Amino acid sequence: MQTASFFDYLKFEKRYSPHTLEAYKSDLEQFEEFVLDTYEINEVSNIEAMHIRAWMVHLIDQQITPRSINRKLSTLKTFFKYQLKRKAIAGNPMAKIQPPKSGKRLPVFVSRPNMERLFEDFIYPEGFEGVRDRLVLETFYTLGVRVSELVNMKINDFDWAARQVKILGKGSKERLVPFAGRFEQSVESYLLKRKEIFPEIDEPNLFLNDKGKSVNSGFIYRLVNRYLSMVTTIEKKSPHVLRHSFATHLSDSGADLNAIKELLGHSSLAATQVYTHNSIEKLRRVYEQAHPKAGKGPAEN
């Protein structure tokens, strides 16, 4: 499809790197092979938008990611723009092509076994620091709060009789999140220790640092990163990972998506749907292991 002059153009005029040139060459060779085998087309002037769309479908069928497909389409866009400039084609077939949308990045979360290690097996420091640090981690995982919500949490936000806590979320939007007796015991233990260490401090915010001042976001980020580093090798170890873990494990246990939405304080269900990924993967594993049509089910007796 007259590619030699195109690569000279990229190399000498555009000054593309050898690595980029190799990527462009690979993309164009794949496209050339497809249109030749499928449509018996070997002239660039005969390429239409329908041929490019068919190639996109072919790539999707091969489970090529949207990001990789977009990169290949970028190669074609540059190629046909060059051919149009040199009047080798009457119109640009890429003008009518809509690239596939890249899916949202899946949330990073800590596995159930590692969360159990964090709360069941890990030995926390003695005294106020250990009780507070554990409660910070428990609060993220039990209530699914954002870091700003935890930092601003007040002692009087808790309704002990109803076992629920008022969370002030984004846009000053309030929501009520329930909690169980075990978490209540953790909060009570912390408040007793706090009163013992800082008897003269009457700070309304729940969490205090080692000097008796309200914690800030930086303090919480460092705390969470330190403890998660001890139980998981995931790259990202921020407070939001614990919020993701809260939502993912609820979804994996069959919790209603609308209920998870309310607990997280999401304004729309679309933001919550990303947490179904783990349940989908679990269903896929069950299917592959047990369904006779999957080819991986148990052997017949």
Image (tube, rainbow, N blue to C red):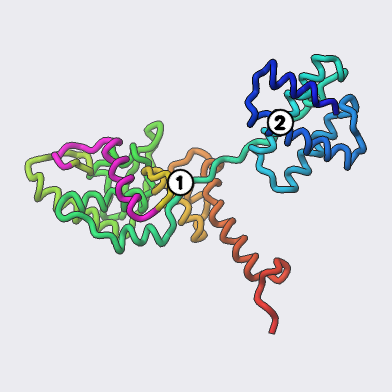
Q: Nearer the viewer, residue 280 or 105?
A: 105
Look at the numbered disc 2 and give the secondary structure of its residue.
helix
For residue 124, side relative to residue 267 (left or right):
left
Residue 114, percent from left and from top: 39, 58
Residue count near mark 2 (Cα–Cα under 10 Å), binned few <14, some 14–19, many ≥20: many
Residue count near mark 1 (Cα–Cα under 10 Å), binned few <14, some 14–19, many ≥20: some
Q: Is residue 257 above or below residue 296?
A: above
Residue 276, percent from left and from top: 55, 52
Q: Quadrant where the N terminus lies?
A: top right
Q: Is residue 14 above or below residue 63?
A: above
Q: Is residue 54 above or below residue 142?
A: above
**Residue 295 magenta:** no
Residue pushed farthest right? 40
Residue 28, percent from left and from top: 77, 33
- The residue singled out by tag 2 in the image is 24
Q: Is residue 164 visible?
A: no
For residue 178, side relative to residue 100 (left or right):
left
**Residue 224 magenta:** yes
Q: CA distance from mark 2 to mark 1?
A: 47 Å
Badge nearest the viewer, 2 or 1: 2
Residue 18, percent from left and from top: 65, 29
For residue 233, side relative to residue 11 (left or right):
left
Q: Is residue 39 visible?
A: yes
Q: Which residue is drawn at the image coordinates 65% and 19% (left, top)?
A: 15
- The residue singled out by tag 1 in the image is 262
Q: Amino acid at mark 2?
A: Tyr
Look at the numbered disc 1 and give the secondary structure of its residue.
helix
Q: Nearer the viewer, residue 248 or 64?
A: 64
Q: Quadrant of residue 300?
A: bottom right
The residue segment tinted magenta is: 210-232
